Amino acid sequence: QVQLVESGGGSVQAGGSLRLSCVASGRTDTGAKYMGWFRQAPGKEREGVAAVRTGGLVTEYGDSVKGRFTISEDNSKNSLYLQMDKLRPEDTAMYYCAAGWSWSCLNSPLRSTDCYTFWGQGTQVTVSA
């Protein structure tokens, strides 16, 4: 089992920035192949935001956040981060951290929530106009 705990959410005005963190604990020695950030707004499906292949060399972003959000990892701290800049009201959602191991998802880890085995509880981000 791997436990994921997100933090860093909050309320911010449009144009502002937030940095989300996700700390992994438990069987982190099993080495997830990729980790990602997803978000879900009320009444909407969970949406892929950003993902990184373990090692940090390959990243993937959702179209709506390209150029504004940056995903990074610090394996020494078992941590995943999401730097969110130029925030917009439509970025308002619960943000979730997730870890996955599927070889079939390795080239496009954002394509489905089914690619992920473990999920955090989420951290709320609210952006006001």
Image: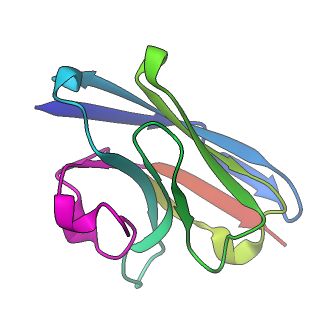
Magenta stretch, residue numbers: 97-122
> Considering only vertical position in the picture, is 121 above or below 49?
above
**Image quarter in which the N terminus is found:** top left
> Considering only vertical position in the picture, is 56 above or below 117?
above
In reply to whether residue 55 is colored magenta, the answer given is no
Total tally of numbered discs in the picture:
0
- Residue depicted at 16% across the width and 28% down the height: 30
| Residue 68 position in % (x across, y down) | 77, 63
Q: Is residue 62 left or right of residue 48?
A: right
Residue 104, located in which quarter of the rendered image? bottom left
| Residue 97 appears anywhere in the view | no
Is residue 100 or residue 13 the one in the foreground?
100
- Residue depicted at 46% across the width and 15% down the height: 76
| Residue 82 position in % (x across, y down) | 61, 46
| Residue 56 position in % (x across, y down) | 52, 41
| Residue 85 position in % (x across, y down) | 80, 55
- Residue depicted at 37% across the width and 33% down the height: 5
- Residue depicted at 78% across the width and 63% down the height: 87
In reply to whether residue 101 is colored magenta, the answer given is yes
> Considering only vertical position in the picture, is 105 above or below 70?
below
| Residue 63 appears anywhere in the view | yes
In the image, farthest residue toward the right: 15
Is residue 74 or residue 57 the one in the foreground?
57
> Considering only vertical position in the picture, is 38 above or below 4?
below
In the image, farthest residue toward the top: 76
Q: Is residue 41 left or right of residue 89?
A: left
In the image, farthest residue toward the left: 1
**Image quarter in which the C terminus is found:** bottom right
Q: Is residue 3 left or right of residue 63?
A: left
What colouring method underlies this structural image? Answer: rainbow
